[in-house]
Amino acid sequence: MNNYFIILASGQSKRFNSNKPKQFHFYKNKLLFKHSLEKAIKSKLFKRIILVVNNTKQIKEKFPNNVFVIKGGKERSDSSLIALKYIKRFRPNNVFIHDAARPDFTVKLLNNLIIALKKNKAVIPVINSNDSIKYKIKNQLFNLNRDNSFLTQTPQAFKFKDLYNLSIKQKNKITDEATLFIENNFKIKFIKGENLNNKITYKEDIKKNNTYFGIGFDIHRLVKNKQLYLGGIKIPFHSGLKGHSDGDVIIHSIIDSILGAMKKKDIGTLFPDNKNKFKNIRSPKMLKPIVELLNKNNFYINNLDINLICEQPKVSKYRDKIIKSLSNLLDIDKNLINLKGKTVEKLGLIGKEKAIACEVICSISE
Ligand code: ZN
C-alpha cells in the first residue's frame, strides 16, 4: 500500500467571486476541502496524504500523523509539482492527484482507480457529457461527437515515477495531469467516473446546498367583539384574537419561523407593539416585507408545517382555504404547506376556548 494522495486546495478560485477561496467555504456543513481529506483518511488506502494550500496558517486543526499540509505555488501545475517533489523522499509507488473542489467522489472510485493502476501508468475517471459540446475553428462551430468525447474528473491515479518525470519536464500550464500524459503520447487507462463527482466552480454551486430551519410560536387571547383571522382569512367565530394587530397567530408564527431560518431575530424587533403605526395592522401586511426580505437574500421556502392549537374552530373545515391564502401570501405552491389541528383535551386557557396558539417550522434554502 504505497499509495499517496495529493489534494490540491491552493486554487485562487477566480471564477468563484468571493474574497475567500472556495476551499474554505462551507459545503454540506464542512469546509469544502475537508470532504476530500476525510474521505482519503477514512479509506485507509493511503500511506500519506498531502494537503496543498495557499497559506498553511489557514489550517488550524490537527490532522492524523499521515496528513501533511504544505504550501502550493501560483498555478495548479506548480502546486502539483511542489507536492510531487515533496513526496519523492518517501519513494512512493502510486500517487493520486485530486482537486479539493470535487468533494463528492466515493471511496469506491478510489478502489477502482487502485485496481486499474496495477496494469497501467495513468488511470483517469471520465464521464459522458450531458450537454452537447461544440468547438470553434475560424468562427465556425463544429459539434463534438458525443460518443467519442468525455469529461475528465479527479482523483486521477498515476505511477509516481512516470508522473514525476513528465511533471519536471513540463513547460506549459496544464489543467490536469492527464493532459501531461496525452501531450507526451503516453497511454492512459480511462475508467468510469461518477456523475455526482462534480466540480464546485461557481459560488452558486455551493449555495444551493445550504438549508436552514426556523421555528415560530405564538399565542393570543380570545376576546368578544373582535373578528377572528387565521392564516389571513376571516373565520366566523364567537370571538377574535386580542392583540396590537389582528392577532393572526398562524401568520405571526410563520413570520417568526422565516425570520428564525434567516437568522434575522424576531417579529417583535421588526414590529414593536409600542409603535402606533402598527396598531390594528392586518397580519398579511406584516408578512409582506418578510417575504421581500427572503427574496432579497435569495432564499426560497422548501416547506412549512403548521400546528394550530385550539378546541374551536375545527381546522378541517378551513384547512383548504387557509392553505390557499398562505400559498398566495407566501407565493409558494400549496403542496409545500401542511396545516394540522391540535386540541388540548379542554385543558387550560386554550381548552376553555380563551386562547389560540400556533407553532410553525419552516425550511428555507439559498
Ligand atoms: Zn401574535
Image: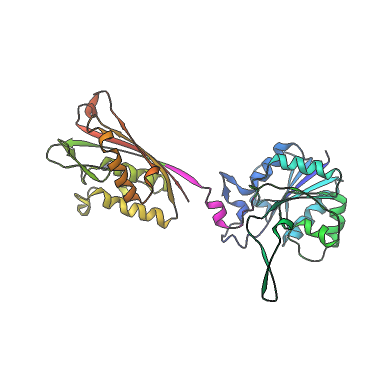
Please check the rendered image and state whether residue 200 is part of the magenta-colored stretch, yes or no: yes
> Which picture quadrant has residue 3?
top right
Side (left or right) of 328 relative to 31: left
- The answer to whether residue 63 is visible is no
Q: Point out residue 284 in the picture as x, y percentages from the top left corner.
A: 27, 50
State the residue in front, 300 or 236: 236
Side (left or right) of 306 relative to 233: right
> Which picture quadrant has residue 321?
top left
**Residue occupying the point 82% across, 59% down:** 182
Side (left or right) of 263 relative to 319: right
- View quadrant of ligand 1: top left
**Residue occupying the point 76% across, 60% down:** 78
Q: Point out residue 300 in the picture as x, y percentages from the top left corner.
A: 43, 50
**Residue occupying the point 57% across, 61% down:** 17
State the residue in front, 243 or 300: 300
Tell me the quadrant of the picture where the N terminus can be found.
top right
Asked if residue 247 is positioned above or below residue 21 in the image, the reply reads above
| Residue at the far bottom in the pictured view | 138
Q: Point out residue 112 in the picture as x, y percentages from the top left corner.
A: 76, 41
State the residue in front, 335 or 181: 335
Colour convention? rainbow
Q: Point out residue 125 in the picture as x, y percentages from the top left corner.
A: 74, 49
**Residue occupying the point 39% across, 43% down:** 335
Instruction: Write the start and end of the magenta stretch as one range.
Output: 198-213
Please check the rendered image and state whether residue 350 is part of the magenta-colored stretch, yes or no: no
